[in-house]
Image (cartoon, grey):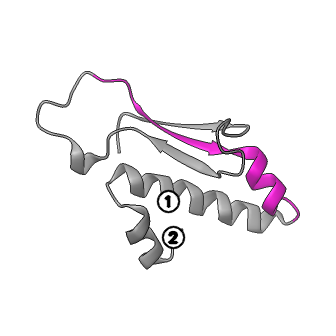
């Protein structure tokens, strides 16, 4: 995986309950002329994750991992329906 920035932010301004968000063009939607662009971005939102899972560090760690993998899946072109089928939503 290249040209992808993974950042931690406090929360998403439009949806403060969101755990993570992929912003970019999925690999499957790019053509041969796709080049010279800023990195895609995966944002992980600290506050909602800590509020929901912060009482148990092991559970919080698992949920962060799941969230990161979920957003990476979007980078590779896996949509929400397929993630639901796979149990990653």
Q: Secondary structure at mark 1?
A: helix
Residue toward you, 30 or 3 = 30
Which stretch did the figure color magenta? 37-55
**Left or right side of 28 for 63:** right
Residue count near mark 1 (Cα–Cα under 10 Å), binned few <14, some 14–19, many ≥20: many
**Do tag 1 and tag 2 residues touch (Cβ < 8 Å)?**
yes
**Left or right side of 59 for 22:** left
Q: In x, y percent, where is residue 30?
A: 20, 41
**Left or right side of 56 for 49:** left
Q: Secondary structure at mark 2?
A: loop
Q: Which residue is mark 1?
A: 70
Q: In x, y percent, where is residue 34?
A: 19, 31
x 38%, y 38%: residue: 24
- Name the residue furthest left: 32
**73 up-or-down from 20: above or below:** below
x 21%, y 26%: residue: 35
Q: Which residue is mark 2?
A: 88
């Amino acid at each position: 995986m290249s040209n992808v920035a993974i950042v931690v932010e406090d929360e998403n301004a439009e949806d403060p309950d969101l755990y993570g968000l992929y912003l970019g063009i999925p690999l499957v939607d790019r053509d041969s002329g796709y080049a010279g662009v800023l990195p895609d971005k995966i944002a992980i939102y600290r506050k909602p994750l800590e509020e929901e899972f912060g009482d148990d560090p092991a559970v919080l760690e698992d949920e962060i991992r799941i969230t990161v993998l979920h957003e990476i899946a979007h980078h590779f072109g896996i949509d929400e329906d397929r993630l639901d089928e796979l149990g990653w939503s």
